[in-house]
Image (tube, rainbow, N blue to C red):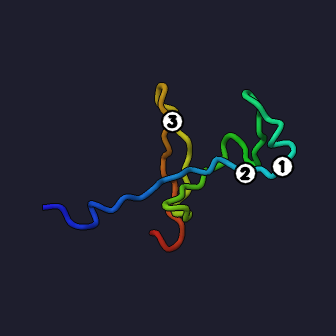
Amino acid sequence: MASNIDNVKVEISVVLGRSVIPMHQLLRMGRGAVIELDSNQDDPVTILANDKPVAKGEIQIQGDKVAVSVLELLRGYE
């Protein structure tokens, strides 16, 4: 028998990096535009659960799929 917690849905997001750009630049962007982020290829990513940071991870490429491997849980979620 499943418990009530089994029915709770959680939205998971992964933040690769951030960037701040002027609105006029954003409005001029088209297909193929590149937005530079404040992170490097080997930097850990932030894993969010319902928009709250819960863990750090690293990107894994498995064939044509992209996955995230959890490296550490953030304080309060251990």
Q: Nearer the viewer, mark 2 or mark 1?
A: 1
Tag 1: amino acid: Met
Say which quarter of the image contains residue 56: bottom right
Q: Position of residue 72 (x, y in %)?
A: 51, 59
Residue 76 is left or right of residue 1, and the answer is right
Distance, label 2 to label 1, CA atoms, is: 15 Å
Position of 72 with respect to 36 (left or right) is left
Q: Is residue 69 left or right of residue 5?
A: right
Numbered mark located on residue 23 in the image: 1
Q: Secondary structure at mark 1?
A: helix
Image x and y of residue 6, in percent: 26, 61
- The residue to which callout 2 is attached is 18
Label 3 sits on a secondary structure element that is strand
Looking at the rendered structure, the kind of residue marked 2 is Arg
Rendered residue at 55%/41% (across/down): 59
**Kind of residue indicated by mark 3:** Val
Which residue position holds label 3? 66
Quadrant occupied by the N terminus: bottom left
Q: Residues within 10 Å of mark 1 (few under 14, many from 20)?
A: few
The residue at the point 81 percent across, 41 percent down is 27
SS at mark 2 in the image: loop
Of residues 23 and 69, the one nearer the viewer is 23
Residue 9: x percent and y percent? 37, 58
Q: Is residue 37 left or right of residue 70?
A: right
Q: Earlier in the sequence, mark 3 or mark 2?
A: 2
Residue 57 lies, in percent from the top left, at 54, 51
Residue that extends furthest to the left in the rendered view of this protein: 1
Q: Is residue 16 above or below residue 55?
A: above
